[in-house]
Image: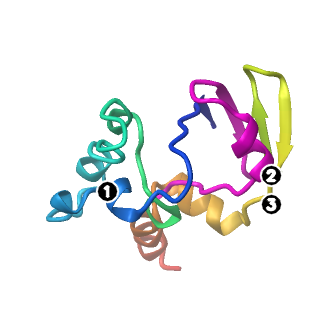
């Protein structure tokens, strides 16, 4: 996966990720449209999920977080734990995602993942 980097600083709380005034819905697309809108209104139209269970790969890499700038083009390889800053030509290592977590993300979140498993009789 690849795309634009968004930086919001440290200690972002859950009310900033999805403002409580929108928690009257469970529709992922509706929630995504409001994600981080109080921090940056332009961000909400791009961001799709707010955690692994809703399909967002959360990565931990202090060096990448420090060096990647807002607006840089970034490429992520979850299976191999690689973060590549395409803008600056630098690569970082992060723990690779286990296969099942990659399936959850690929399915679009935990609910879709479970639905697929149930439908397949697994």
The label shown at residue 95 is: 3
Residue placed under numbered mark 2 in the picture = 81
Question: Which of disc 2 and disc 3 is earlier in sequence?
Answer: 2
Residue visible at 85% across and 36% down in the picture: 91
Of the two numbered discs 2 and 1 in the rendering, the one whose residue sits closer to the viewer? 1
- Regarding mark 2 in the picture, which secondary structure is present there? loop
Residue corresponding to mark 1: 18
Disc 1 vs disc 3: Cβ atoms closer than 8 Å? no
- The residue shown at (46%, 61%) is 109
Mark 2 crowd level (few <14, some 14–19, many ≥20, 10 Å Cα):
some
* Left or right, 117 with reference to 44: right
Give x and y (percent) for residue 16: 35, 55
User: Could you say where residue 110 lies in the image, as x and y percent from the top left?
Assistant: 46, 68
Residue furthest out toward the top: 87
Magenta span includes 63: yes
Image quarter hosting the N terminus = top right
Which of 71/98 is in front?
A: 71
What residue span does the magenta drawing correspond to? 55-79
In the rendered image, residue 22, in percent from the top left (x then y), is placed at 18, 57
Q: Which residue lies furthest to the bottom in this view?
A: 122
Mark 3, Cα crowd under 10 Å, few <14 / some 14-19 / many 20+, is: few
- Between residue 118 and residue 70, name the one nearer to us: 70
Element at badge 1?
A: loop
């Amino acid at each position: 996966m690849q795309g634009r980097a968004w930086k919001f600083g440290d200690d972002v709380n859950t009310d900033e990720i999805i403002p409580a005034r929108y928690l009257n819905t469970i529709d992922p697309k509706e929630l995504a449209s409001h994600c981080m809108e109080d921090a940056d209104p332009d961000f909400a139209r791009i961001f799709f999920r707010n955690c692994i269970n809703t399909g967002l790969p959360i990565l931990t890499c202090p060096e990448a977080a420090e060096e990647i700038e807002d607006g840089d083009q970034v490429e992520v390889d979850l299976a191999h734990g690689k973060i590549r800053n395409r803008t600056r030509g630098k690569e970082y290592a992060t723990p690779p995602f286990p296969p099942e977590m990659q399936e959850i993300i690929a399915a679009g979140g935990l609910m879709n993942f479970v639905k697929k498993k149930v439908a397949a009789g697994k």
